[in-house]
Image: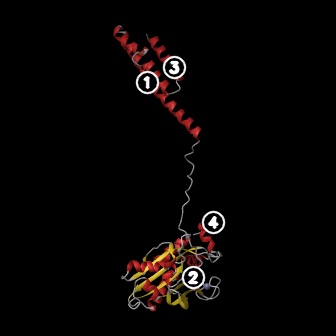
Amino acid sequence: MLTQLDQIESQARLALSLVKDEIGLEAWRITHLGRSAPLMQVFDQLSKLSKEQRPLIGRRANEVKRALETALTEQTEALHQAALHRSLEGERLDVTLPGRPLPLGRMHPANKSLQEVIRAFADMGFQVYRTSEVETDEYNFGLLNMPPHHPARDMQDSFFTTDPGIVLRTHTSPGQVHTMRAFYPEPIRHILPGMCYRYEQISTRKESQFNQLEVLAVDRGITFGDLKGTIADFGRRIFGENVRTRFRASYFPFTEPSAEVDFECFLCAGKGCGVCAGTGWLEILGCGMVHPVVLQNGGYDPQVYSGFAAGLGTERIAMLRHHIEDIRYMWSNDLRFLEQF
Ligand SMILES: [Zn+2]
């Protein structure tokens, strides 16, 4: 019977060495360690053996059983390892390779500049008010004291839509009338930022789309002194504590009196350089006291109220700051340009 146990063990081991997968392992377990396996029949017969033989055979049978169980565990593990190895080889996945970095976006220089200008005015107590980029002829021109055939319209070549009287706004100034009509009779301290469109001959200095920011203050007793103080404060916030400001008389249909504002060149501190074309001054914005007709169109009685307005192109500030020589870079979506900011 001992010989029989040896045979059982060696046959089982041989069979196990031929098993190639998990289904085979389970079949082997049933055949060699299951209820009706030859080994189990030996256990069944123990009671029939003599007192001398019983412990001898019993011990050996237990040895074989443990040995086969161990062999099964080992073979299971070996098959798992082999499967893992095959899948690693097959998929060629190298987990030690460094990952591909995701390209990280950043703020567009035009938006960055717009945000800085907005922040400067917000710190002075102005609120952002946004109006539509599509306007009626009336809001874009008429209500701003530019009736049909007014020569000032010629300064702003426009994109008219196929709907009569509907135009892409050529400036943020139509927002003046919108905001006055929305807030009358409240005092107004608003900035109106956003994209404007003109049918331009595109050049290094002119694009058909650009950001503008309109400043509007309306209240009782607002004077040109308030305008000058606000603009000078803005200049210091954007160009530095000691920057000087220069007002030159100008003309806009929707302000009276009107002025162009220059800030001292921040690059050469007024000495004259390439950026300021040797003048020492940079043209930054247009402004003036809100024209009585415009106040009236907004619902404010010009006998009681007064106000000032200013408008500036925020791309121009970015261009001056970063020495960008061509405005077309702003909207050409060239990453070589955009990644520099
Ligand atoms: Zn300069």
Front disc: 1 or 2: 2
Instruction: Provide the residue designation for mark 2.
Output: 153
Residue underneath mark 4: 336
How far across and how far down the image is residue 300, in percent?
A: 40, 85
Residue at point 46%, 11% (across, down) = 4
The label number, if any, that marks residue 69 in the structure image? 1
- Mark-to-mark CA distance, 1 and 2: 97 Å
| Lower position in the chain sequence, tag 3 or tag 2 | 3
Q: Which mark is residue 15?
A: 3
Give, as a three-letter code, the residue at label 1.
Glu
What crowding class fits label 4: few (fewer than 14 Cα within 10 Å), some (14-19), or many (20 or more)? few
Return the residue nearer the eye: 68 or 36.
36
Disc 3 under 8 Å from ligand 1? The reply is no
Which quarter of the figure has residue 223? bottom left
Q: Amino acid at mark 2?
A: Arg
Tell me if I can see residue 118 in this picture.
yes
Which mark lies nearer to you, 3 or 2? 2
Ligand 1 falls in quadrant: bottom right
Q: Residue at x 57, y 43 (%)?
A: 93
- What's under tag 3, amino acid-wise? Ala
Q: Position of residue 143 (x, y in %)?
A: 48, 82
* Tally of marks: 4
Q: Earlier in the sequence, mark 3 or mark 1?
A: 3
Q: Nearer the viewer, residue 164 or 266?
A: 164
Helix, strand, or loop for circle 3? helix
Marks 3/4 in contact by CB < 8 Å: the verdict is: no
Nearest to N terminus: mark 1 or mark 2: 1
Which-is-in-front pick, marks 2 and 4?
A: 2
Compute the Cα span from label 2 to label 4.
38 Å
